[in-house]
C-alpha cells in the first residue's frame, strides 16, 4: 500500500509539473541573473583598440561609474566594428562598464519581443523602425531622447529625420542611424551584349524587354523582381502617378482600389513585355534571394531592384564579374520612398540615461567612435559622422552612389504599416497577390480587391 | 531442382548462380544509388566549405574548382575574444549533457509510475499528459520566459532555464515511448524480484532499467540531438556572447542584409556536428532496436 501511495505521489507531481508549463520549483533562489554576465565585457576589453584611445584626457563630461547593457543584431563585420567601438569607449571613460550581446537577425526579434514583455530590454539597443509601433505603443518603452539632448547632440540629424522616429507621446524614440531606400543595380555586361545602355527611365527599361528577348534569348531579362520587390516597385509607380505616399503618416491608405489595380496592371505589363520574368520562372530556380541565383550570377537577370545598403552581397556573389555590376538611378517615371533603416534607442527604464547617451554620442557623433563603427549600419545620417567618414575616405563608393541615387530622387514618406506581417509575411498578402497574379490565378481586378482588403485591414480608415 | 530447359546438375547450378549474381548486383545497385542520393547533400556541404560564394550557388559539383581554406580559417576566428567555435561547442555540451541525464531519469521514473501502477486519477493524469504531447513549444515561450525571468534564470551562466525543466519529465513523447516499451516486458520478472525482497524502487533499478536499455538509449539520443540543435531556447535565455552555444555561434555571421561568406558558415556547421555524428554512430545499434521495438505492440 505504501508503494502505491509513493508512486501516486511521484507520478502526479511529475504530471503536475508538466502541466504547469515546466515550472514548479518556486523555492529556487532568485536574483543571480545580473551578476554572472560580466565575464564577456571584461574579457573583451583587451582587444586591439589601443590605437584609437585618445591622448587628450577628455574629462569634459562628468559621469557616474556604472554598468550598461547593450545589444544589436547583424553580421560578422558589424559585430567586430561595434565591439571595437564599445571597447574604445570603455577605455576612454573608465568606470563605465558595458555588457554587450549580439546575434544574427533570424529569430532575434522573437527573443527581443519576450524581453519587452518582461521589461528585460537592455539600456542601449539597436532597434528597428517599426518597433516604435510594435513595442512602444504607450510611449513608455523608449526614453525620449530630448531629455538627454545636452549629452547626445541631436542637431546632427535633420528635423525631418527626427520627425519620423517620434512615438505616440511625441518623444524621440530613437536616433536614425541611417536612411535607406531602393534603387536599381544593373549588370552592364548583359546590356552591352544586347547592344544597349543601362536604362535611366522607365520607358527605356520597358523598351529593353523585347530587345533582350530578341537578341539574347528567352531566358534573358533586364530586371528581376520577387513578390516583395514587386510590391515596392508598384508603390514607386503609383507614387509617381499620384505624387503621394501609399500610406500616409497617420496610417491611411492613400490609393483607391482602382488605383491599386492600375499599379498591378503595370506589373502585369512588365511581365508581358519580357521586362521581368514570371514568378513561376523565378521560383522554378529555387534561389531564395538573387545573390544565390545562378541566373543572376551568370548575367541572365541583368538588373535588380534592391536596398542601397545591399550592394555588398551581390558584389561578393558575382565574384570575378563584379566590375560589371553598376548602380543605377531611380528610373524617371518612378517615385521612391526612404525609410529609417536602423535606430539606436535607450530604454526608458535605464538607470543611467546620461551615461547611455554618452555612449550613443560616442558611437554616432564622436569622430573616434564613428571611425570605428564605419559604415556597418549604412551611410550614417548624422552629419558629423558622414563628414568624418567622408574625409577619411572610409565610405564605400558603391554604397554612397546607391544611397545618393535614392536620396537625390526626393523620396516620399514611408509608413512601417507597409511591412506589417499580414502584408509582408511569407504567406501574406504580397506573396498571395503577386504570385497568383503572375500565375494567372487572379485577374487584375481580383488581385486589386485582395490587396485593397489587406491594406484596409491594417490601415486606419 | 533442375527444371525447364536445364538438363544437367551443372547447368542448373550455373543457372542458379547467375540468377543469384544478378539479384545481388541489382540489390547493391539500388542500395548504392539511393545511398548516394541520400548522402549527396552532406558530401556537397563538405565540398562547399572549400568554395567561394559564387561557386556555391552556380554548381552542383561537390568538388571545388578553386579550393580555398578561407572558410576554415574564418571559422576559427573569435568574436572580440569572447567566443570561438570550441568554446561554443563546450557551452553546448555543458547544458546538453545535464539535460539528457535529467530527461532520462525523470522520464523513466514517470513512465514506471504510469506503466506499472494503478492509482487514483491514473487515467485522467495519463490523458492530460498525452494531451501535452500536442502542445507546441511556441505557445509556451512567452509564459515560460516570464516565469524564468521571475526566478532570475534569464541570462544566468549555468543555463538553469534550459536544464531545470528537464528534471520534471517534460518530454511527453519519451514517457509515451517508454510506457509502450514497458508493456512488452513480462511482469513475471518483477513479481519474482518482489518475492526475493525487492521494493518498487529496487525493481526499477535492477530489473526494469536493464531491460529498458534500448528504449532509454533512444530517448537519450533523441534528447541529445534535439538539445544540441535547439536555437530559440538559448537565444531567449542566454544573453552573453561568451555563453553562446554552437547553434547560435554558427548563425552569428549570417547577416542577410549585407551578405556573408557561406563557406565559413558551412565550415562552422560541419565542425560543430562532428560530436553529434560520433555519438550517433556509437549508439546506433541500440538506437535502431529501441525505436523499432517500441512500436511493435500497441
Image (cartoon, grey):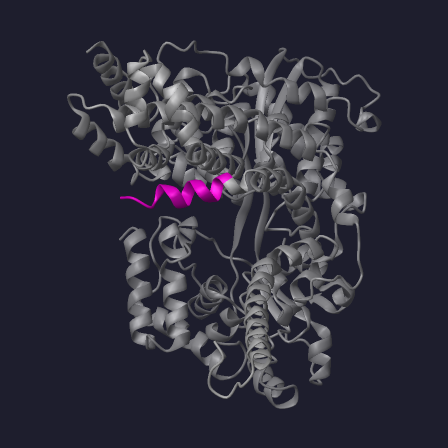
Q: Would you place residue A161 above or below residue A174 in this image?
A: below
Percent position (x, y) of residue A260? 36, 69
Q: What's the magenta region?
A: B286-298
Q: Quadrant of residue A15?
A: top left
Residue B294 inside the magenta-drawn segment: yes
Which residue is located at x 19 percent, y 26 percent? B122
Left or right placement of residue A313 versus residue B26 in this view: right
Residue A351 inside the magenta-drawn segment: no
Is residue A251 visible from the viewing direction of this image?
yes
Q: Quadrant of residue A211?
A: bottom right
Task: Single out the residue that lies furthest toward the left.
Answer: B120
Percent position (x, y) of residue B82? 69, 27
Q: Magenta residues: mostly which secondary structure?
A: helix
Left or right placement of residue A283 versus residue A260 in this view: right
Which residue is located at x 74 percent, y 62 percent? B63
Is residue B146 visible from the viewing direction of this image?
no
Quadrant containing the C terminus of chain B is top left
Which residue is located at x 60 percent, y 83 percent? A208
Percent position (x, y) of residue A343? 55, 39
Left or right placement of residue A172 versus residue A379 in this view: left
B207, A36: nearer the viewer: B207
Q: Would you place residue B288 above or below residue B51 in this image?
A: above
Q: Would you place residue A51 above or below residue A161 in this image?
A: above
Task: Single out the residue that lies furthest toward the front.
Answer: B8
A57, B22: nearer the viewer: B22
Amino acid at each position: 500500500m505504501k508503494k502505491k501511495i509513493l508512486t501516486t505521489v511521484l507520478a502526479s507531481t511529475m504530471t503536475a509539473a508538466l502541466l504547469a508549463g515546466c515550472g514548479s520549483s518556486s523555492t529556487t533562489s532568485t536574483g543571480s541573473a545580473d551578476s554572472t554576465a560580466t565575464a564577456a565585457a571584461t574579457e573583451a576589453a583587451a582587444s586591439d583598440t589601443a590605437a584609437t584611445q585618445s591622448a587628450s584626457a577628455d574629462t569634459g563630461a562628468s559621469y557616474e561609474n556604472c554598468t550598461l547593457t547593450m545589444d544589436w543584431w547583424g553580421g560578422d563585420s558589424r559585430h567586430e566594428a561595434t565591439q571595437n567601438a564599445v571597447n574604445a569607449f570603455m577605455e576612454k571613460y573608465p568606470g563605465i562598464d558595458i555588457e554587450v550581446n549580439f546575434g544574427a537577425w533570424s529569430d532575434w526579434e522573437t527573443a527581443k519581443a519576450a524581453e519587452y514583455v518582461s521589461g528585460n530590454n537592455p539600456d542601449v539597443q539597436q532597434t528597428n523602425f517599426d518597433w516604435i509601433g510594435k513595442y512602444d505603443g504607450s510611449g513608455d518603452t523608449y526614453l525620449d531622447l530630448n531629455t538627454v539632448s545636452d549629452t547626445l547632440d541631436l542637431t546632427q540629424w535633420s528635423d525631418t529625420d527626427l520627425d519620423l522616429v517620434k512615438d505616440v507621446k511625441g518623444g524621440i524614440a530613437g536616433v536614425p542611424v541611417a536612411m535607406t531606400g531602393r534603387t536599381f543595380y544593373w549588370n552592364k555586361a548583359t546590356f552591352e551584349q544586347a547592344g544597349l545602355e543601362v536604362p535611366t527611365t522607365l520607358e527605356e527599361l520597358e523598351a529593353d524587354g523585347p530587345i533582350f528577348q530578341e537578341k539574347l534569348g528567352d531566358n534573358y531579362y533586364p530586371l528581376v523582381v520577387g513578390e516583395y520587390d514587386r510590391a515596392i516597385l508598384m508603390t514607386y509607380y503609383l507614387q509617381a502617378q499620384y505624387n503621394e505616399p501609399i500610406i500616409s503618416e497617420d496610417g491611411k491608405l492613400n490609393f483607391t482600389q482602382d488605383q491599386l489595380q492600375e499599379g498591378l496592371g503595370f506589373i502585369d505589363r512588365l511581365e508581358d513585355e519580357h521586362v521581368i520574368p514570371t514568378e513561376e520562372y523565378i521560383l522554378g530556380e529555387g534561389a531564395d534571394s538573387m545573390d544565390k541565383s545562378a541566373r543572376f550570377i551568370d548575367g541572365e537577370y541583368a538588373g535588380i531592384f534592391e536596398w542601397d545598403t545591399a550592394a555588398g552581397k551581390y558584389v561578393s556573389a558575382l565574384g570575378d564579374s563584379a566590375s560589371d555590376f553598376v548602380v543605377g538611378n531611380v528610373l524617371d517615371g518612378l517615385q521612391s520612398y526612404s525609410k529609417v533603416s536602423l535606430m539606436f534607442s535607450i530604454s526608458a527604464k535605464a538607470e543611467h540615461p546620461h551615461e547611455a547617451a554618452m555612449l550613443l554620442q560616442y558611437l554616432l557623433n564622436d569622430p573616434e567612435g564613428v571611425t570605428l563603427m564605419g559604415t556597418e549600419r549604412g551611410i550614417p545620417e548624422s552629419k558629423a559622422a558622414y563628414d568624418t567618414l567622408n574625409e577619411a575616405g572610409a565610405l564605400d563608393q558603391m554604397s554612397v552612389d546607391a544611397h545618393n541615387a535614392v536620396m537625390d530622387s526626393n523620396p516620399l514618406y514611408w509608413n512601417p504599416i507597409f511591412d506589417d506581417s499580414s502584408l509582408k509575411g511569407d504567406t501574406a498578402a504580397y506573396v498571395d497577390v503577386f504570385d497568383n497574379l503572375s500565375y494567372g490565378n487572379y485577374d487584375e481586378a481580383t488581385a486589386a480587391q485582395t490587396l485593397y482588403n489587406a491594406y484596409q485591414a491594417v490601415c486606419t480608415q | 531442382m533442375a527444371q525447364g530447359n536445364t538438363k544437367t546438375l551443372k547447368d542448373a547450378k550455373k543457372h542458379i548462380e547467375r540468377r543469384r549474381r544478378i539479384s545481388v548486383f541489382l540489390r547493391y545497385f539500388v542500395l548504392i544509388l539511393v545511398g548516394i542520393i541520400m548522402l549527396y547533400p552532406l558530401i556537397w556541404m563538405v565540398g562547399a566549405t572549400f568554395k567561394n560564394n559564387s561557386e556555391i550557388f552556380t554548381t552542383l559539383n561537390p568538388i571545388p574548382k578553386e579550393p580555398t581554406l578561407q572558410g576554415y580559417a574564418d571559422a576559427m576566428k573569435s568574436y572580440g575574444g569572447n567566443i570561438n567555435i570550441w568554446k561554443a561547442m563546450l557551452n553546448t555540451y555543458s547544458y546538453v549533457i545535464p539535460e539528457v541525464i535529467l530527461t532520462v531519469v525523470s522520464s523513466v521514473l514517470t513512465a514506471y509510475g504510469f506503466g506499472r501502477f494503478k492509482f487514483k486519477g491514473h487515467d485522467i493524469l495519463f490523458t492530460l499528459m498525452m494531451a501535452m504531447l500536442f502542445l507546441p513549444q511556441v505557445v509556451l515561450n512567452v509564459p515560460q520566459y516570464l516565469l524564468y525571468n521571475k526566478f532570475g534564470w534569464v541570462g544566468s551562466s549555468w543555463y538553469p532555464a534550459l536544464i531545470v525543466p528537464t528534471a520534471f519529465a517534460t518530454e511527453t513523447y519519451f514517457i509515451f515511448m517508454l510506457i509502450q516499451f514497458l508493456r512488452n516486458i513480462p511482469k513475471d520478472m518483477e513479481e519474482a524480484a518482489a518475492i526475493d525482497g525487492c521494493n518498487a524502487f529496487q525493481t526499477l533499478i535492477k530489473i526494469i532499467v536493464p531491460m529498458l536499455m534500448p528504449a532509454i538509449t533512444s530517448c537519450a539520443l533523441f534528447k541529445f540531438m534535439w538539445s544540441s540543435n535547439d536555437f530559440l531556447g538559448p537565444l531567449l535565455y542566454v544573453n552573453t556572447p561568451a555563453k553562446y552555444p554552437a547553434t547560435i555561434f554558427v548563425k552569428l555571421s549570417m547577416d542577410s542584409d549585407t551578405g556573408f561568406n557561406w563557406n565559413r558558415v558551412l565550415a562552422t556547421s560541419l565542425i560543430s556536428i562532428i560530436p553529434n555524428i560520433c555519438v550517433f554512430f556509437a549508439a546506433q545499434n541500440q538506437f535502431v532496436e529501441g525505436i523499432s521495438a517500441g512500436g511493435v505492440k500497441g
